[in-house]
Image (tube, rainbow, N blue to C red):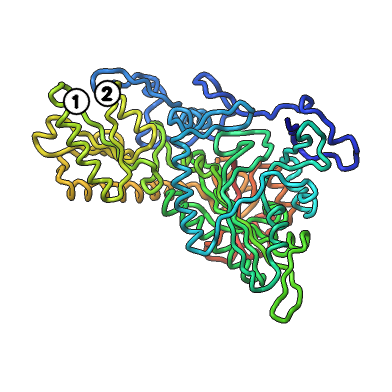
Amino acid sequence: MSSVRANVPNRTSSTALQWPIQTLSPCRGPVPFRSNTRLAHASAAPVTKDAPTAKQQKQKQVGGGGKAVEVAVTPRSEDFSKWYLDVVAKAELADYGPVRGTMVIRPYGYSIWETIQSYLDGRFKELGVQNAYFPQLIPYSFITKEAEHVEGFAPELALVTKGGGKDLDEPLVVRPTSETIINHMFAQWVQSYRDLPLLVNQWCNVHRWEMRTRPFVRTLEFLWQEGHTAHATAEEAEEEARRMIDVYTDFAVNVAGMPVVPGRKSRIESFAGANCTYTIEAMMGDRRALQAGTSHNLGTNFAKAFGTQYLDRESKRQYVHQTSWGVSTRIIGGIIMTHGDDKGLRLPPRLAPIQAVIIPIIKKEEDRVPVNEAAQRLADAAKAAGIRVKIDADERQTPGWKYNHWEMRGVPVRVEVGPKDLQSGTCVTARRDMPGKEGKQMGVPMEPAVFVAHVQGLLDEIQAGLMAQAAAFRDTNIVDVRTYDELKEAIAAGKWARGGWAASDEDEKRVKEETQATLRCFPFDQPEGPYTCLMTGKPASEVAIFAKSY
């Protein structure tokens, strides 16, 4: 049996590697999914026009067939943190693992991750990136080769110190990221300029010993992809780092419907061991920022640590220039907090595992066969057109229960088919993004071509609408500031503060200490200048965004 412990051994002590696992303080994980639990209160999100009051939310809703359906989630405006946990649980996205701070991704949650994987994997391969896999266990000596890297990751490491009942000669790090072990292999694979560029990606899990966790957003173990590339020149590496953050931006905006702000991280906020980090920052429903994806220009830092060199065209040995980039299951948490409402998830159609659910409404036994056959014909037509569709023919539940169930799961379009619809040759559609009568359309023809065109049109409208709502919310909550006092006021009001910045690292640390806000990025899209540093009053070459974050 292996012995695993968190954090880094004390390199000055010869006995540091002998700590038994029983001496560990358990990682502080989030509270279980229970309706009567409370987390630390996050900033309240504004109430959307469709959000019911707390009193209404606690009342029972009556679904079709007269069966009462208990509303499942805490209103966002009442407790955003509790609302988030309710949605994760009630939409059956994830549950807690037996080790505190770990997460079990349930099938519906994993299907969302599979959609993300499918899109990104296709884009990577279009750009010439190949998939590979590297070991999860990394020699501790590899981590220490790059000074900034070990310093940045030291508090988050988990170590294996025993194997096969014996003490290991060297502790093994459970993969927190793979720059070190991949460089160890790159140093063997790269010999000549002909071997470059080298572009690989792996889909895997990583472990970081987080002390405060939240499902999807921050857990001890999570899933991600991490791309690693090696190039002959600094210019090629910079181009690759920027290209990949553009891929993430495209995914976030055009698939996930998240109006992210792409930009460059400050020196303090950059990845440990990187020359520069690029990021996409998303505004959540409580106005906190979420780092949804990053791309790092590593320069020659890891190449020098691992001796990753190549012979150039003049037969001179040169260090490779590298990048790494990644998106994780954290983005699922971002999608929940960007689009969700008091009824649960709202999934953008291009991301949704199920884009349309068809619900047969059967009131009499003689209706069963014709209604189910009609539902199947609609489903076949939708599938043939590439729409991800499901028929919910479960006879144990009423139509009203099913409406609430699929609303909670964020399915963009619901289709209702009953005996009266068969008589008129039509059906009813309902949009997840528009509750009540506003989102319902009666009399939709069941002729396959017309029906498919109608559903495809709804999916396009919903995708655009969710993006527009999120962008409007973001833009309303970004405040331009000219002084530090104005920044503090904006942060205290739960806003993002945008202003000129040319101050020192110490000034940036001061902002974090005094406001709990961090410099999220220097946006690529800069407003028209000139700019003045909000901290020093001196001329600044660019603006930065500060915000509280997850």
Image height of 316 relative to 109, above or below: below
> Taking 186 as reference, is 444 above or below it?
above
How crowded pointer 2 is (Cα within 10 Å; few <14, some 14-19, many 20+) is rated as few
Which one is in front, 285 or 424?
A: 424
Image point 51% across, 50% down: which residue? 478
Amino acid under disc 2: Glu
- Badge 2 marks a residue whose secondary structure is loop
Q: Nearer the viewer, residue 242 or 534?
A: 242
How many badges with numbers are in the image?
Answer: 2
Badge 1, how many Cα within 10 Å: few under 14, some, many 20+?
many
Which residue was labeled with disc 1?
362
**Residue at position x 75%, y 32% from top?**
3
Measured from the top left, where is residue 46 in percent x and y? 45, 37
Residue 438 placement, left or right of 443:
right
Looking at the rendered structure, the kind of residue marked 1 is Ile
Give the labeled residue for mark 2. Answer: 395
In this view of the protein, can residue 66 be seen by the observer? yes
The quadrant holding residue 63 is top left
Quarter of the rendering occupied by the N terminus? top right
Q: In the image, residue 193 lies at what x, y percent?
A: 67, 73
Q: In the rendered structure, which disc, 2 or 1, sits on the residue that comes first in sequence?
A: 1
Q: Which quadrant is home to the C terminus?
A: top right
Q: Residue 475 at x, y = what percent?
A: 46, 51
Decide which of 19, 410 is in the foreground and name it: 19
The disc placed on residue 285 is none
Residue 364 shown left or right of residue 483 in the figure: left
Residues marked 2 and 1 touching at CB (< 8 Å): yes
Label 2, label 1: how far apart the Cα atoms are: 9 Å
